[in-house]
Amino acid sequence: VKQSTAEMAGGMADWVEKDFAVKTKEDLDDYTYYVAGLVGVMLSQIWEWYDGTETDRDLAIGFGRGLQAVNILRNQEEDMEERGVSFMPEGWTRDDLFVYARENLAKGDEYLRLIKTRTITLFCKIPLALAKRTLKAMEEGKEKMSRMEVEEVVEQVKSE
């Protein structure tokens, strides 16, 4: 965990120096790796320490990237207006970012299939389900999910 935290801090510092200028898909992959993919790696390290659960590093990174891509989509206007930052690669449309989010959230589904401990599964499954539902809400023209929708998703995941 210590190594991943140090790597994350260094990568985030690099992005501050670059003024968060995401120009290519590779830039987006790099940015999302440092701000979210490494969180997946750290969680995998914790699961292995906790009960021996082994996961796939690339799937863990993809899971984090997918969650971050949803955040980018959700906060796109605010990031631009308040911070003057766009995490959208040049030439990309919002639809391209939706595809990127879905592809990486699918890696989150694969990641979860490797986990057998119920508490760990719930810990991961709730944000994954919320991210998918948030994408759906945005596609329907909503800014975000309602509190009731969030509660429904959480209850649905807990009852599975």
Image (cartoon, helix red, strand yellow):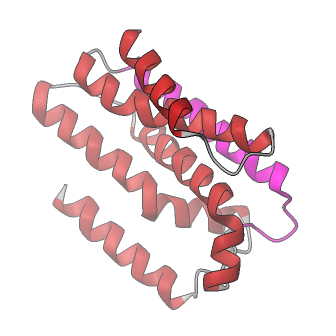
| Quadrant of residue 27 within the rendered picture | bottom right
| Quadrant in which the N terminus is drawn | bottom left
Residue at the farthest top position: 160
Q: Residue at x 73, y 74 (%)?
A: 23
Q: Residue at x 71, y 35 (%)?
A: 136
Against 127, residue 70 (above or below) is: below
Q: In front: 29, or 157?
A: 157
Q: Residue at x 53, y 60 (%)?
A: 32
Return the x and y of residue 104 as percentages of the image width and height: 60, 40
Q: Residue at x 42, y 75 (%)?
A: 12
Give, as a single range, the part of the protein colored magenta.
88-114
| Quadrant in which the C terminus is drawn | top left
Q: Main secondary structure of the magenta part?
A: helix
Return the x and y of residue 21 as percentages of the image width and height: 65, 81
Query: Is 36 within the magenta?
Result: no
| Quadrant of residue 115 within the rendered picture | top left
Count of number-bearing discs: 0
Against 49, residue 97 (above or below) is: below
Against 108, residue 118 (above or below) is: above
